[in-house]
Amino acid sequence: MIDSLDQYMVIFFVIILLALSFGIVNTMLMAVLERVREIGMLMAIGMNKWKLFAMISLETIFMVMIAAPLGLLLAYITIEYLGTHGLDMTGLYKEGYSAYGFKPIIYPQLDMRYYFNILILVAVTAVLASIYPAITALRLDPVKAIRKI
């Protein structure tokens, strides 16, 4: 049985991963659109469409392989620091917190299994988010792409 904290974490993960996927799609679409002439030239000289698809997808995966561990390390350091020293929320609605039985200083903690789950989910999200920009690159007409200014 899934406890309520796990249910909230799943909802939180879904929201964050949706935002992540939009960010990855936007970044990779910009990378593709900035290199329209280059991609058109590669297609004109006979580059295989699957190799072009793999090139865009691998670029996304490499970007995530660098960013995800760095982001997880930063998150771990932040959570450990705030878990020890606390996040003081006394300036914001102190009476509101005490009315519901919450303390104004929050000590966050996150189980280590969530870090591994996040890493796997981010990798899967990156692979799925790389599909649309790669398909957009495949749809380019080489002649029009080369002429584009």
Image (tube, grey):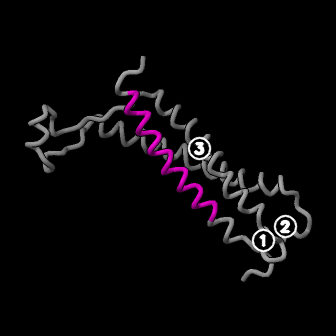
**Residue at mark 2 to residue at mark 3: CA–CA distance:** 28 Å
Which residues, given as a range, are shown in magenta?
A: 6-29
Callout 3: SS: helix
Q: Earlier in the sequence, mark 3 or mark 1?
A: 1
Checking the image for residue 125, the label placed there is 3
Closest to the observer, 80 or 50: 50
Q: Which mark is residue 42?
A: 2
Screen quadrant of the N terminus: top left
- Disc 2/disc 1 C-alpha distance (Å): 6 Å
Against 107, residue 68 (above or below) is below
Identify the secondary structure beneath mark 2: helix
Alpha carbon separation for disc pair 3 and 1: 27 Å
Residue 18 in percent (x, y) is at 50, 47
Task: Name which of mark 2 and mark 3 comes first in the sequence.
Answer: 2
Q: Are marks 2 and 1 in contact (CB under 8 Å)?
A: yes
Query: Would residue 83 appear left or right of 9 to someone viewing this image?
Result: left
Q: Which residue is mark 1?
A: 38
Q: Amino acid at mark 3?
A: Thr
26 inside magenta stretch? yes
Q: What mark, if any, has residue 16 been given in the picture?
A: none
Residue 94 location, quadrant: top left
Q: Amino acid at mark 1?
A: Glu
